[in-house]
Amino acid sequence: MVRINTDECVSCGGCIDLCPTVAIRMVDDRVVIDPEKCTTCKICVQVCPLNAPRVLEEAG
Amino acid sequence: MSDMYDVVIVGGGPGGLMAAKVAGENGLKVALLERKEHVTAIQRSCQTMFAIEDEYYFGERMYFNEQQKRLVFPVSGFSLPYTGPYLNFYAWHVYTPDGKHCIKLGDYEQNRAKGHKGRLSVFYSKQALLESLLKDAQENGVSIFPGMNVVDWRRVGDVNEVITAEGTHFRSTFTIAADGINSRLMKILDLNKQRKFYGTLQGAGYYMTGVAVPHPEAINYPIIFHKTTQYPVMIWVGRSPYGEDEYWIYAGGPSHPEISYKDILDQTVTDSPFSGWFTHAKVVKRHAHVNNIWSPTPTPFKDNVLIVGDAGWTVEAECTGSMMSGLKAAHAISEALREGKPNRAGVQKYISWWQHHFPESVDYKDFLTLLSSGLVGEDAATYLYKLVTEILPCSLNPYNLLNSINGSIMQKLDRIQTERPDILAKLQSAATVPIDVQMKGFISTGYPNY
Ligand SMILES: Cc1cc2nc3c(=O)[nH]c(=O)nc-3n(C[C@H](O)[C@H](O)[C@H](O)COP(=O)(O)OP(=O)(O)OC[C@H]3O[C@@H](n4cnc5c(N)ncnc54)[C@H](O)[C@@H]3O)c2cc1C
Ligand code: SF4
Ligand code: SF4
């Protein structure tokens, strides 16, 4: 699965819009990924201009 | 949620908030849903110039009246109070990748000497503007729902239903999709299938203090090229209205797996022909954006959903274009409800307005040539830009901006023929290639949300 590094993320919303499984949403102005919905397609990793989403090798 | 609204608006940007204010003033029962908790917080990149003063744009001739502190839209027939900060700017300076040459659009010194009469426009606080729209909407009875992520939409009989990740359902006669450039509603309504996809733009930026640019009251605009892909990268350095001595810095361009715009931004600041501007600079805040580039939606309507602003336009409608369409959509819905025509015929005025002022008044492909012009590559672009030594008239209209530069280059074709026949050949063949083909590379490295 993928996790957002909240130190890097500015909550611009780009990855939320383009996640094909609607796994990402904004909660209290922070961006969070629902591990149940994430298919590790890595689109968010590629679209984020700030390199904030990170692939976690294990789990999910 | 069992409440039935006249209109549910998705998105609290300039388009959605303007629609909410106007629909509220007209007496409709309105809900506005926004995924941010702080509706007016600015998290996405925006240079916040008042676009566009002193030229017609989308059929409007808007300007900022600093005596009355109002943003004026005379063609559409409305004005808005704006009491926030603003900064004049006087020229647009395009730098070659080596930083050695600058194309001057607008005469900086001469314009500056004229004060506000000589300015190209102002940078203003988008946040202050959004706050004033939000306040007006609330005072007119609009229900604001922050922290709502809209994930689905459906039409059941005559009722539209917006569904959020938080598990709430909002029912209404009309829906306004003001959910921005990568609109989820456009995707759910299947409207992106009628549009052409041209790629994905990404950008990262900083708000910084301590920046030292040669012309602080201009837009400083280096065009550089990513080394391995030769993709064009736009760098912007302009003043920020949000803080004393603050600047808005930005690096952006088409998405590509090898390109990190954050890395390019950092390299520009620390190790580039432009890093001298940032020797004593400090990052105050960061920003970013991701924009899918689509051709405009031919019809801003389906199943009682009206499309407003960036959601249906190419790259950007600008804050001003989004506000105008929000206003027109809200008025059209008010009229439709009064007429007892809660359907397409009722809001036909909005559809016609959109078609006349957006897709028909400008050719969005001209906008894309701004991007594709970078396709000649670093060597050719550097050579060509250096030919432009005269001060050119400036236009903030992206549809005209390039014409100014290209017009000057075209006058030097004889010289290019003698000095660089290879570049001339490149230009000539590019001129005959359709935009879809020119942008093939960007399309293949983009992430369409069909
Ligand atoms: C680099 C850059 C520079 C720019 N410079 C300028 C400039 O100088 N001047 C100018 O006028 N414009 C500029 N723009 C463009 C301007 O920012 C936009 O055109 C404008 O904000 C569009 O307004 P909008 O209301 O249509 O959409 P947005 O402002 O994008 O608002 C959409 C809102 O909807 C919310 N939202 C989206 N999806 C959902 C969902 N599923 N559920 C709930 N809420 C949702 C978002 O959080 C957002 O608040 C710039 C843009 C960029 C990227
Ligand atoms: S694209 Fe990047 S910066 Fe923007 S919200 Fe997603 S993770 Fe955060
Ligand atoms: S990896 Fe793919 S599915 Fe998972 S959050 Fe990112 S975009 Fe969504």
Image (cartoon, coloured by chain):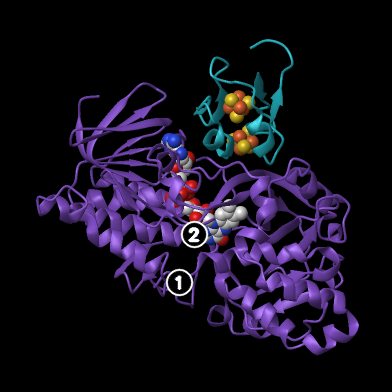
Chain colours: A cyan, B purple
The foreground one among B318 and B313 is B313
Kind of residue at disc 2: Glu
Q: Is residue B173 above or below residue A26?
A: below
Q: Is residue B8 above or below residue B239?
A: above
Numbered-mark total: 2
**Point 57% across, 72% down: residue:** B396
The verdict on label 2 being within 8 Å of ligand 1 is yes
Q: Give the class, few, some or many, for how many residues have Cα within 10 Å of label 1's Cα (few <14, many ≥20).
A: many
Q: Is residue A5 visible?
A: yes
Q: Is residue A45 above or below residue B192?
A: above
Q: Chain of mark 2?
A: B
Q: Position of residue B439 (x, y in %)?
A: 66, 57
The foreground one among B245 and A44 is A44
Residue B318 numbered tag: 2
Q: Is residue B103 above or below residue B135?
A: below
Q: Is residue B50 left or right of residue A50?
A: left
Q: Position of residue A31 (x, y in %)?
A: 56, 29
Quick check: do tags 2 and 1 share a chain? yes
Kind of residue at disc 1: Tyr
Quarter of the image where the N terminus of chain B is located: top left
Mark sitting earlier along the chain (2/1): 1
Q: Is residue B134 left or right of residue B378?
A: left
- Residue position marked by numbered label 1 in the rendering: B57
Find the distance from the CA under tag 2 to the CA under tag 1: 10 Å
Q: Image quarter for residue B328? A: bottom left
Asked if labels 1 and 2 touch by Cβ distance under 8 angstroms, the answer is yes
